[in-house]
Amino acid sequence: MAAPPLTELRPFAYTLHGQRVADPYHWLEGSAAPEAPGDAAVDAEVGRWTDAQNAYARGVLDALPGRATVSAELESLLSLPAWGTPREAGEWLFYSLRRGDEAQPVLYVQRGQSGERRELVNVNRLDPSGDLALDWYQPSRDGRYVAFGTYRAGDENTLCRVLETATGRWLTDEIAGRVDPVAWLDDGEHFFVRKLKDAADPYSGQVTLHRVGRAAADDPILFTQYTEGPLATTWGPSPIVDPSGRWLVIAYYTGTDSNDLWFYDLQATDKLVRRDLLVGERALTGGFIAGDTFFALTTHGASNKRVVAFDLDSERPEQFRELIAARDDAVIVDIAPALDRIVVDTLVSAQSRLEVFDRAGKREGAIELPGIGSASIVTNEERSSAWLRFENFAEPASLHRVDLATRRTELWQRTELAAAADEPKLVVKQIEYRSADGTSVPMFLVHRADLALDGTNPTILYGYGGFDISMTPAFLTAWRPWLTRGGVYAIANLRGGGERGAAWHQAGMLEQKQNVFDDFYAAADWLVANGYTRRDRLGVSGRSNGGLLTGVTITQRPDLAAAAIVGVPLLDMLRYQHFLMARYWVPEYGSAEDPAQFGFLERYSPYQNVVPGTAYPAVLLTAAENDSRVHPLHARKMAAALQAATTSDPAGRPVLLRVDRDVGHGPGKPLEARIRDAADELLFMAHQLGLEIR
């Protein structure tokens, strides 16, 4: 098919702050639109339109040369054993593992490191379709029980169940409502729960206390999200629990870069009394409780974060003392409790460093890592050992046991690549480039060691730039066939992320969001200027907030690249806040309902900035109908607008829309769907950028 299906223009407009906003593809919002709630007839019509778009996209993507070859390679790569980081509780060792062609990971247990492996939860047996996913698991502190969460078809509406470790027997406990990982108490019978009162209402957060064997409906409610005012539609309450059961700290989000801290003495009286710890500050604070001390990691007074201690049982608990000072050359991203110690996870130039401190804040030393890359650690406050996960762009994840006293590591599991003897060596570089305002921005480059800087290399530039999320080294499983054939993969650490602290994040929020886009364009310009590629060999890629990034890129700079992947994106920034859980993100982006914020949102909102008669690059938009975060209406409306507006020949530079019916935003996607989607994206870019698939 040389041309996409035609989409009907239907007159529709609304007024914001005295300005008329045309929305001719408004009908593609379906029954989600506030103007058409629950209209089944509208949804049926949108469904038929989606079927036509999917057929068009499949007709183009399935015909691309090399599909069988690439799909076979991806199946081999994505079927490599995928180990989860172990957890220890009592005499038991728990971990997840997906092997071979299994659709989803399986939860296993064994006695110690040398015991015989045994299945605990195999969602592949429970649902052979592959749609049921294991979201999380949390053993009780003595290991007797395991609470675990599952959801179906990517909807992330997690249901919590409990089983007995020794027998594998499922108990009658069942807690619904998008349940977060639970926090067990020392008694092994109770755990704290953060869930939604109403799964259909993303702003109905609750904190409850569950007892094993008790009906969830009878659990006491300790905290309920506000229902009025600006805090009613933030991420709401997150519990930080004292394992002994005395103290409860509530971190209540006031934005994407701030939360208030309150605490309760659960043993003081029959009625809970809220007391303030840190309130009204533009700071993010979390941590753990040990004894009567809340060890907190905070951006309060420290953009790169510091560790402080609150004495909850003192007369002035809000007065804290600093244990570990902030550093100018590193960002502390997490702290974890171990026996008499604190393990501190830091980023230095977007690369991991792990250090051990005693509880008084004295540094004991750094944990030895296998190399330069990303590390995460699972600790236990009752043990002096821990479990380390490490990976980088060129090598799959490996798992190591850590002796925190000596800070030495011992390899436990490593996924080995079955690489051909003549497979080229890959190298990773990190460079710094200048953005439009002179800011220095880091970027990772991954490519073959024998790459020639002749300006002809097919190159993909990936970015995110939001929500304090850092782009750190991770094995590029789905893009390895791209790299081994001579393609370049670049990851820019844009402002809006967390790579350089709270100030770096805030420099890419709200009215500063244009900095993120400018950083991305400057990365592309650097790649061209330094001989890595040229415009017709350059593609851009992003997902979610990164899909907004690439959506803005093709509207602000349609000449920047030849192709774009716009994955599960936000694209109508004047209406995004009306759908699903999107009011969570108003503190990050702003809202067009605010006249001061309407101006900067309108200037960059991709859907409103599609200009007829423009030669747009080839575009692959993706969406999912079970997405609980970003509504597929964004990709639908944008696809229709681009298909109608572009002057590029659709036979050469098509605008494609792929809408998945049985998956969500990404987590929990079964293996078969992951292989198909990875092949689609790689082949789309290879065809557009001139990477030969033999």
Image (tube, rainbow, N blue to C red):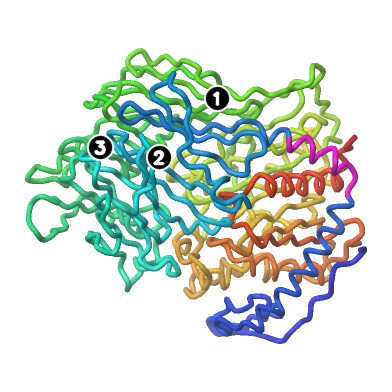
Q: Could you say which quadrant of the image residue 299 lies in?
A: top left
Q: Amino acid at mark 3?
A: Phe
Disc 2 or disc 3, which is closer to the eye? 2
Confirm whether the magenta stretch covers residue 68. Answer: yes
Q: Could you say which quadrant of the image residue 428 lies in?
A: top right
Vertical comparison of 592 with 251: above or below:
below
Mark 2 neighbour density, 10 Å: few (under 14) some (14–19) many (20 or more): some
Region in magenta: 64-75
Whether residue 667 sits left or right of residue 484 in the image: it is left
Residue under circle 1? 398
Residue under circle 2? 168
Q: Position of residue 640 (x, y in %)?
A: 76, 71
Residue at 68% x, 54% y: name it.
Answer: 550
Vertical comparison of 226 with 399: above or below:
below
Distance in Å between CA atoms under marks 2 and 3? 35 Å
Under circle 1, the secondary element is strand
Number of labels in the image equals 3
Whether residue 369 sits left or right of residue 619 in the image: it is left
Residue at 83% x, 43% y: name it.
Answer: 686
Which quadrant holds the C terminus?
top right
Which quadrant holds the N terminus?
bottom right
Vertical comparison of 439 with 7: above or below:
above
Q: Earlier in the sequence, mark 1 or mark 3?
A: 3
Distance in Å between CA atoms under marks 2 and 1? 28 Å
Residue under circle 3? 295
Q: Amino acid at mark 2?
A: Gly
- Magenta highlight: main SS: helix
Q: Amino acid at mark 1?
A: Ser
Q: Position of residue 517 (x, y in %)?
A: 63, 52
